[in-house]
Image (spheres, helix red, strand yellow):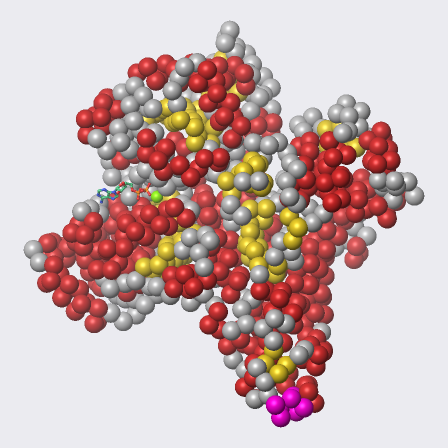
């Protein structure tokens, strides 16, 4: 019983069903009304709405939404959609399968919240869906007198501000995050684009709230061109001899120079001992260049498009726009590929998506794969998951995995399977694990004369179009992992006769070319098939050489191998895969929680700074500094108005705060590096053997307090030296320069995290030997 009570999943839909009955009885009375009467009744409802909204009013609003949706969009929300809407309104993460109509399900809670005076942000999976969904629902929202805005990457500040000012805003979480960070840097209130974060409804919630939770959004000073040395290093590394100059470990997760390699580097750069402490910067760059050259593979880890490096999202297989690798790695990669090297400027501000979501007063979400992430939603956000059963039972046939001993054998079997399915007319969607694999498979199929489409990060602008065709008779579509999250695959593409043909052929068949590290991601791919009670099927192909088995080991699984290399698919293998996925998911959750601990302290400090800055921006917080600068103030006051002087002081204080924060962020990185070092070396000489996290807290707090203490002196110094005339501070002054041109990006995980530690440890040992 105790276990049940603590379950992160809510199974009991009775309260929602009760409200649903209320809605239905009220909605029945609306059917006979003409449009004008409907509007009049709605308006009378408006006049009584004042927060908090009671359940009767809520039911009425839901009923109006149902009726209006029927009239304006030609769709009456199904009961399942109303239940989902009610659960969203109550702050649940709603688990509702693909194709059940989550977009429309969200409309009622959006409207109910907006009518109660809350600003509602609907956070979609990507720009395309923000546009599609806001356009789809706009007539409905307007019927209720609500304004809708939509934000896409690349929009101007003006456009963003206008959109955020609307009652309802459709955009992605990262665009909100970037707006939030930029708002922290403005010098005048009217430059802020956000007008409050209140209610968020998150679509594809597992992707945004979990998979992307720990990704930091970063805003930095403009990216500058640099640096010849990196190009030189990359060239030297390329010339090293694979067999003698460096060595990789078994799984190719790390690489290091051998004696001969080190000597070659020393010759090329004219330094005596590469491992001398004075050469640490060179050694670091060389090490990065070596990792990037040997371990990062083009078309798997990244692609080159439009003359720049594009990272690929591991969960979606899409180009991760604006994502950069940390530290020097991005630059090293650019050098490797002979591209212009861009260097990130100073970090001006940063926030993780998880912390961003915490800035909303209320968060709820929806996705087709919430159940498997229920524990994470609960632990990371204290959000409960609610399962809405599909309108028609899902009749998808999930065939048991087919297991092969080698990748090559697996690939042959996949090609044969696709060919034989295509002959039956059943459309096939093939999910591969990376761009290169998708291209290889595509090439193989074309060679065999099988007509097919390729959808991966290189052509994802055609996504909607390709996905729309994926359900056509005899279609074969090769895609990377989850390309197409959120877009609907119609069987036979809208044509009724064709639709019947495809259904007869068995609906859409999904082939996964390997299991992912998380079952949730596997299930996302399966969920593309058999939507809304359609027929459909799915099957995964697995080989013991797949990445997943790196962690699991394939020992003792090889018995009963056939000529084609296929193993008898046994319960043992399935169990092993399921176990491996659970272990990895658990490890990932632990890692997320650990990282959260570190970033949480910085977030708390950021909020202190933010509040301080807002007091200056919005109020008269600069007042306390005035008495410190009386001499300059008085000497200027003969020519400069008090208003202008106040404004100048405000700007000076804000600039000083920004500078402190930039400095603080770089100190934090420095502290983290130090702690990594200590962890790597495995000694606990630092502060008498304290836990690394406690050392971090102590040092980070100390630095923060020191910096705050220096604020006053910095303000006085700046104010006394900056040029001020009757117009105030010159707009071209360096005080504005730091924040004037910024770029925003998402910081990717360092793929060599563990390796870095080993590398640091090895240098440390060498240094200590001297
Ligand atoms: P999900 O996000 O759950 O995968 P979507 O919101 O993309 O699903 O909707 C899937 C399809 O179902 C869309 O084509 C949509 O227009 C359609 N649809 C949704 N609700 C209804 C409804 N009440 N009546 C008819 N069609 C609907
Ligand atoms: Mg959707």
Q: Is residue 60 left or right of residue 671?
A: left
Q: Position of residue 384 (x, y in %)?
A: 40, 50
Can the viewer see residue 17 in this picture?
A: yes
Specify whether residue 224 is painted magenta: no
Question: Residue at point 69% right, 63% down?
Answer: 663
Q: Nearer the viewer, residue 153 or 729?
A: 729
Q: Position of residue 510 (x, y in %)?
A: 38, 26
Question: Residue at point 62% right, 59% down?
Answer: 221
Q: Position of residue 182 (x, y in %)?
A: 53, 62
Q: Nearer the viewer, residue 318 or 721?
A: 721
Q: Is residue 381 above or below residue 483?
A: below
Q: Quadrant of residue 501?
A: top left
Q: Is residue 105 left or right of residue 560?
A: left
Q: Nearer the viewer, residue 122 or 128?
A: 128
Q: Count the marks.
A: 0
Q: Is residue 724 left or right of residue 461?
A: right
Q: Nearer the viewer, residue 615 or 297?
A: 297
Can you say which quadrant of the picture contains the C terminus? Answer: top right
Q: Is residue 343 left or right of residue 144?
A: right
Toward the top, the furthest residue is 563
Q: Position of residue 348 (x, y in %)?
A: 61, 61
Question: Residue at point 20% right, 46% down?
Answer: 75
Residue stretch rendered in magenta on the structure: 633-639
Specify whether residue 634 is painted magenta: yes
Q: Quadrant of ligand 1?
A: top left
Can the viewer see residue 766 in this picture?
A: no
């Amino acid at each position: 019983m105790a276990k049940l009570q603590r379950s992160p999943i809510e199974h009991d839909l009775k309260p929602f069903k009760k409200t649903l009955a209320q809605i239905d009885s009220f909605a029945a009375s609306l059917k006979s009304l003409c449009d004008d009467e409907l509007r009049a009744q709605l308006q009378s409802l408006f006049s009584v709405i004042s927060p908090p909204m009671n359940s009767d009013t809520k039911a009425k609003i839901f009923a109006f939404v149902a009726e209006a949706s029927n009239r304006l969009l030609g769709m009456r929300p199904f009961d399942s959609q109303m239940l989902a809407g009610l659960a969203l309104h109550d702050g649940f993460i709603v688990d509702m399968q693909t194709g059940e109509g989550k977009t429309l399900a969200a409309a009622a809670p959006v409207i109910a919240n907006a009518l109660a005076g809350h600003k509602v942000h609907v956070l979609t999976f990507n720009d395309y869906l923000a546009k599609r969904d806001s356009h789809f629902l706009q007539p409905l929202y307007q019927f209720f007198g609500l304004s809708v805005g939509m934000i896409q990457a690349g929009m101007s500040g003006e456009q963003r501000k206008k959109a955020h000012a609307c009652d309802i805003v459709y955009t992605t979480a990262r665009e909100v995050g970037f707006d939030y960070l930029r708002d922290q840097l403005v010098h005048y209130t009217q430059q802020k684009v956000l007008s409050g974060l209140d209610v968020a409804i998150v679509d594809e919630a597992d992707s945004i709230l979990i998979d992307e939770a720990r990704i930091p959004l970063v805003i930095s000073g403009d990216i500058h061109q640099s640096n010849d040395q990196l190009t030189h290093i990359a060239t030297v590394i390329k010339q090293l001899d694979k067999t003698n100059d460096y060595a990789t470990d078994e799984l190719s997760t790390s690489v290091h120079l051998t004696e001969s390699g080190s000597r070659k580097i020393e010759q090329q750069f004219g330094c005596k001992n590469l491992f001398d402490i004075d050469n640490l910067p060179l050694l670091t760059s060389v090490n990065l260049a070596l990792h990037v050259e040997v371990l990062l593979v083009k078309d798997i880890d990244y692609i080159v498009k439009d003359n720049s490096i594009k990272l690929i999202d591991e969960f979606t297989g899409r180009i991760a726009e604006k994502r950069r690798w940390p530290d020097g790695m991005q630059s090293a990669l650019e050098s490797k590929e002979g591209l212009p090297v861009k260097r990130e400027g100073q970090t001006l501000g940063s926030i993780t998506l998880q912390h961003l979501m915490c800035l909303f007063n209320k968060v709820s979400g929806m996705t087709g794969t919430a159940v498997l992430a229920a524990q994470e939603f609960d632990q990371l956000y204290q959000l409960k998951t609610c399962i809405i059963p599909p309108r028609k039972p899902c009749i998808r046939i999930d065939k048991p995995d087919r297991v092969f001993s080698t990748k090559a054998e697996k690939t042959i079997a996949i090609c044969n399977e696709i060919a034989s399915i295509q002959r039956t007319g059943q459309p096939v969607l093939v999910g591969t694990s990376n761009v290169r694999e998708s291209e290889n498979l595509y090439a193989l199929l074309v060679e065999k004369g099988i007509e097919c489409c390729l959808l991966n990060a290189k052509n994802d602008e055609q996504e909607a179009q390709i996905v729309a065709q994926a359900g056509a008779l005899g279609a074969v579509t090769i895609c990377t992992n989850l390309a197409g999250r959120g877009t609907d695959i119609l069987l036979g593409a809208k044509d009724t006769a064709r639709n019947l043909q495809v259904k007869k052929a068995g609906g859409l068949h999904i082939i996964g070319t390997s299991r992912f590290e998380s079952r949730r991601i596997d299930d996302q791919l399966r969920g593309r098939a058999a939507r809304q009670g359609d027929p459909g099927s799915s099957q995964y192909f697995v080989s013991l050489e797949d990445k997943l088995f790196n962690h699991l080991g394939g020992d003792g699984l090889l018995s009963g191998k056939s000529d084609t290399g296929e193993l008898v698919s046994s319960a043992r293998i399935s169990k092993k895969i399921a176990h491996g996925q659970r272990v990895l998911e658990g490890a990932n959750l632990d890692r997320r929680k650990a990282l959260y601990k570190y970033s949480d302290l910085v977030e708390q400090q950021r909020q202190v700074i933010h509040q301080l800055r807002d007091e200056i921006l919005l109020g008269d917080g600069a007042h306390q500094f005035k008495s410190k600068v009386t001499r300059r103030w008085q000497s200027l006051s003969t020519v400069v108005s008090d208003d202008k002087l106040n404004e100048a002081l405000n700007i000076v204080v804000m600039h000083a705060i920004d500078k402190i924060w930039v400095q603080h962020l770089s100190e934090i990185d420095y502290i983290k590096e130090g702690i990594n070092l200590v962890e790597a070396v495995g000694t606990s000489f630092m502060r008498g053997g304290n836990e690394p996290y406690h050392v971090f807290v102590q040092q980070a707090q100390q630095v923060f307090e020191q910096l705050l203490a220096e604020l006053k002196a910095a303000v006085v110094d700046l104010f006394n030296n900056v040029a001020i005339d009757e117009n105030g501070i010159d707009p071209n002054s360096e005080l504005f320069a730091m924040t004037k041109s910024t770029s925003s990006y998402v910081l990717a995980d360092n793929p060599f995290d563990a390796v870095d530690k080993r590398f640091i440890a090895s240098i440390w040992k060498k240094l200590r030997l001297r």
